[in-house]
Amino acid sequence: MENQANMPAAPGNYTENQMLGVMLVGLGEYSSGQLGPALKETKHCCLKAVASGDPAKRKKWQQEYNLKEEDLYSYDNFDDIKNNPGIDIVYIVLPNSMHAEYVIRAAKAGKHVICEKPLATTVADCQRMIRACQEAGVKLSMGYRLYFDHFNQEMMRLGQEKVMGNIKRIIADDSMDVGEKNQWRLKYQLSGGGPLVNNGVYCVRAAQYVTGEWPVAVSARFLPKTDPDKFKEVEEGIEWEMEFENGLIASCVSSYSRNGNLLRVEAENGWFELEPAYEYEGLKGKTSQGDMDFPAVNQQAVQMDDFAICLKNKEESRIPGEMGLRDVQIMTAIYESAKTGKKIKLQLAPADNLIHI
């Protein structure tokens, strides 16, 4: 383990009105289509730097966001960010298998970190990432944007407060047509899995934040492959059930060959649902008592601002890395169940600072 005395000091002691500098690592579709534009709307942080292996992408971002030459990084000189005091937060937006390496490198550079989902491709890597951030004295947060969406917040309230009585059943579906076959999501070495880790993680998380509880067991099965060549490395689709302590079952599905976007909760005295439930915008909700009516928000802008506020106030993120660890543990068990045909009982690792479900 590196001597902490030789590590850069973690940023801190921010002023209330200070704009914290964000670095985006990985300039793919999510960065260009969502995070970059969101950082034009944030009130507590702003885009300060980018990292990419593509010089043309770095130049394009420099021009669009008026970045300085010294704030453009390749993966080769990434560790030099330790010498850039303008970078407070590093947002990892890389293929899943690269998350662990770059979260750990960012932590060693003394920077706070946001990591896109899933936190990593193995439980062991998740634990290494969390430990590295703890040792460096920096905070690690997940890119779980739905915690800042009004519709999903209402689902949490209705479920956790048992507004319509005890929950009897949950149905969750997050599926999409994945598109062309030569993309990183379909390469196991980069993705660590198929639709479960890319889309299904939203169902895994939703079942927990609606109930306010952890699952105790999972059962799963892979769906038939209609295109074995395209899906030769990852599953095309998967169905699973998450069982909770009181016997409640969340029935979930995720596929790469059709579209689906639903979160439905059936309770003793009514029901409530979102469809679509997990999109960046255009969410719609209704209940047995009437439609939900909430203003739209830029989920990513509010998410990044919330983390910046947490850093200013020296508070824990409501979506810490430990939450990502729990979800990787659950998804690992789901894959084990699908492969073996057996129900898998969950033994989730302790997470001392996991303050939200």
Image (cartoon, rainbow, N blue to C red):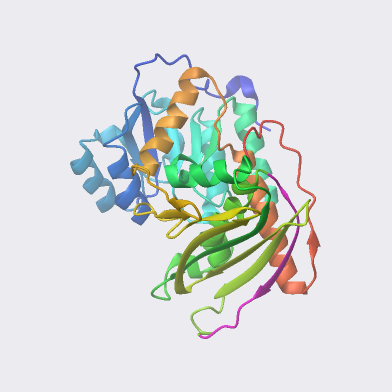
Q: Is residue 216 left or right of residue 304?
A: right
In percent of width and height, residue 211 lies at 65, 47
Q: Is residue 249 left or right of residue 68?
A: right
In percent of width and height, residue 326 lies at 67, 47
Q: Is residue 258 left or right of residue 54?
A: right
Determine whether 265 is above or below 37 in the image. Answer: below
Nearer-the-camera pick, 97 or 8: 97
Nearer-the-camera pick, 303 or 75: 303
Give the quadrant of residue 17: top left
In percent of width and height, residue 25 lies at 41, 44
Q: Which residue is at 51% across, 27% downward?
A: 110
Examine the structure image and report whether residue 58 is included in the region drawn in magenta. Answer: no
| Residue 272 seen from this side | yes
Q: Which residue is at 44% across, 48% downward?
A: 93
In percent of width and height, residue 318 lies at 55, 33
Examine the structure image and report whether residue 225 is included in the region drawn in magenta. Answer: yes
Image quarter in which the N terminus is found: top right
Determine whether 353 is above or below 32 in the image. Answer: above
Determine whether 28 is above or below 297 in the image. Answer: below
Image quarter in which the C terminus is found: top right
In the rendered structure, which segment of residues is drawn in magenta? Answer: 213-226
